[in-house]
Image (spheres, helix red, strand yellow):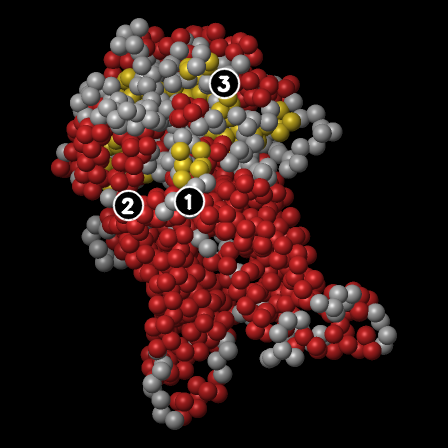
Amino acid sequence: MKPMNVFWAFVKVILVVVLLSPLVLVVLFAFSDRAISNFPITGFSLRWWRDMFEFSSFWGAFKNSMIVGAWVGVLTAVIGTLASLGLLMLPQRRANLLLLALALPLMLPPLFLGIMLLVWYLFLGLQLGLMTVVFSHLLIALPFFIIVVYARLQSFDLIAVDAARDLGASPLRAFMTVTLPIIQPVIVGAALMAVALSLDDFILASFTIGGGNTLPIMVMSTLRTSVTPMTNAVGTLLIALSISFMLVALRLTRYRG
Amino acid sequence: MAGGVARSYRGLSIPLRKPAFLLVPALVVYGSLFVAAVIYFFAMSFWSVKSFRIVPQFTLANYHSVLTVNVKPFLITLAVAFLVGMTATVIGFLYAWIIRFRAGRFGSALLFIALLTLFGGYLMKIYAWKTMLGGNGAINSALISLGIIDSPIESLLYSPLAVVISLSHFLLPFTILSSYASLRGIDDAEIDSARDLGATPWRILLDITIPRARSGLLAGFSLAYLISTGDYLTAQFVGGKMALYGQLIAPQFGTFFNWPLGAAMSFSILATSTMIISLVAFCLSRIGRP
Amino acid sequence: MQQSGLKRVSTMPGMSRRSFMAASAAMGATSMMPNTARAATQVNWLGWQGYDDPLRTGTFLADSGIDLAATYLSSNDEIVTKLAARAPIDIVTPYMGYVPYMREANLIQPINRSKVPNLDKVLPVFLNDSNINADGALWGVPLSWGGGPMVYDPAVVQPTSWHDLEKPEFKGKIGIMDEALGMMLTTSIFVSGADVASLITPKQLEEVKKYLINLKKVHARAIFPSYGEAADAMARGEVVMTLGGAEWLPAIVAEKKELAYIYPKEGCFAFLDSYVIPASAPNVDLAHAMANHILTVPAQLTLTANNYAVLTSDAIEALPDNKKTMYPYHDIAKFQERCTFFPMTPTETDGSFASWPEWLAAWQEVIAA
């Protein structure tokens, strides 16, 4: 079996390298002192980070990304939790069907979704702004959230809840004092994943934002104009932010696949 | 796990008895934003534009245009999407399979890595590939220093190959997670007994593993395929002269000012993609049937 | 002045610009919902990176109570898309050529000249451009100008003509920009044989299209979505000559590689960029104030940081010597020998000339080929 083990180990390494190298390189060049994102790396430098923090539209974009992310997280958590609970009460088949329908926006190419929403907001007479971006992100964050929470909730053991009820607590009390604390980590975790998704999105945001930038929109404009690794710095920031949210989320939801 | 689930969660009845109430907010968001938008957009695909105004009168001209103009990029995009879908799904399945059957302790680490790459943003990944695939990029440099090639491979960047590589890589986390989700459900016992009965690894793969993983494989492939057909940024940055259909749709909402045509083009390629995916689903269901 | 009626133009201007500005105050802070209790008003600005720098000079923004929310373009389509969707934007900086088009589509509003007194300082050559003057009104406040030169790598080639792009030794090393107007107009200059490159017959348009398709298939390395991308490719040695570009493109990558530009002997187009006010602008007075401010000397001079050109009489006088030689300020006539401000191709014609939608359709064929 030895040669087979070596073979599989080799394959594993190749796959991991393929998966990670682009992101690793992005982060790597953000610290290089060369003005072009390429090898060889001649030295270490933080100048691109300084450039980024001093970039005129950076703080605005950062703030907008945070605001949108926060709204998306909160709204998704509330609406999504209610929906997950509702799904739990439905027969499995119907729940799955509904879930599939809710996931359709995830399946659409973001270009189409962005354009459709833009056209629709216009028709409704909505003022384009950060809230319209929040709505757009909700469409893709909600199914994601519900899928994760619904799956986790199905494996929960709520005997404790029944016990509380048997002891005379009203349904609402039982929910608040027993159920909620139990499912809270899952909810927070899934909400953080939703926030990470919102942070990373470029296409939907660029179509449905009124004025201003979010971080990905700013990345795009620097990609168009600047060829310095400052773009890498912004990218690294985004990667760091979304990955840290995701890490916390994983801990909270105890994700197993 | 059948319908009985609802009842054992009595504690969740809360003040509301019907599940419908809980689902209302989500459905309102979904219905008013998504469903309504799709319907409106679809209606728009039958309209036209005159002097910068949208004329809401029924016409099939847009769809006629789709069938006659820009057919070549339409077909090329479908083909590229297929290639990307296949590449992402196969590699994703391989990775997921390794996690499930060959990784042991490292399984969670590998899964974690896959999840990690889900985030980080679409744009940065395109940018990273542009750097890696160039004449002086990481890949060419590595190949040259290993002595495998003498001079850089120019066609790694600004080519259809670059588009396929970038898109497939972007979609890998999706296909990996999707495949893994269904592979998880395979019982070790089943595999072991098949092996005891003398089945070769290939047989096991074809008769047990793949059929079980079908939904995950299909979900991954569909996502990969659909995302590719709507892509308009990857080709712009690394595709060189190649234009994917998305690049022809986007300007319809910009300087070309023909939203109805853009809508018709969008639905056309979506519909065609769905048909192709159904075809793939059908073929997939044939694997493993003796 | 000279050329038959000094026609003006449009165009390309700015695909992408990069700001070299070092620290600037964190003016970018935005608030999501304008709070009436606050003194500052959020003003939305959509344009090319670097074109907002003139606004950040002195204490103008603070004095006017403006909270500037600038969004940078990555393509021209964005302006049209967002304005057509009635996004609440106060200033856009479009290609001049798109001003007549947007005017016809009712996407923009005329400038109230009484609110922009600094207009008097703009050189007449730019202020009277036919593309921003129509129906007896002014539709844009001029900001900067330039030509559409060929950018090349001087270590590899010394071109003199646009036809040098076809040289067999450079096959696969030519850069084309993903910009309909600039590319088609430039090609029209040396291929169509028409007197005015923006007014060509359908047959001539066909020739232009064929040339571009051939150039793309046989000679081009890639079609670049922006100047930044093109400059990047040239710095990496992937491209040695471009069909069109900007005078400041070499400056983007000056640190990495020396590039140069030239106005080939057949000629180029010239462009004018301006501040335009959308029809749906929520803060019209502030927009006018902003447009007025960009014509002050310090504001104009910020443009030189990116090697853009200035266009007011006093700013030109105040230019440092090294910047004065970058553009032919004191002999605009000479610049116009090579670079012409063309009038915009009409959106509707009686068939004698190809219309703008026909140009766009031809460009789509080039992209799709």
- Three-letter residue code for mark 3: Pro
Is the residue marked by circle 2 packed among few (<14), some (14-19), or many (20+) residues within 10 Å? some
Q: Residue furthest left?
A: C168
Q: Residue furthest right?
A: A168
Which quadrant of the figure has residue A92? bottom right
Q: Residue furthest bottom?
A: B197
Q: Secondary structure at mark 1?
A: loop
Comparing marks 1 and 2, which lies closer to the viewer? 1
Distance CA(mark 1)–CA(mark 2): 20 Å
Residue A77's place in the image compared with A255, above or below, is: above
* Residue of label 3: C110
Residue A188 x %, y %: 66, 59
| Sequence-first tag of 1 and 2 | 1
> Observer-nearest residue: C263 or C336?
C336
Q: Residue at x 16, y 28 (%)?
A: C163
Q: Residue at x 56, y 73 (%)?
A: A93
Distance CA(mark 3)–CA(mark 2): 38 Å
Image check: C133 left or right of B40?
A: left
Q: Residue at x 29, y 54 (%)?
A: B75
* Residue of label 1: B58
- Three-letter residue code for mark 1: Phe
Q: Secondary structure at mark 3?
A: loop
Which quadrant, please, contains the C terminus of chain C? top left
Residue A225: tell me if it is visible.
no
Which quadrant of the figure has residue C180? top left
Residue B60 x %, y %: 36, 47
Asked if both marks, 3 and 2, belong to the same chain, the answer given is: no
* Residue of label 2: B69
Residue C54, label in figure: none
Chain letter of the residue carrying label 2: B
Chain letter of the residue carrying label 1: B
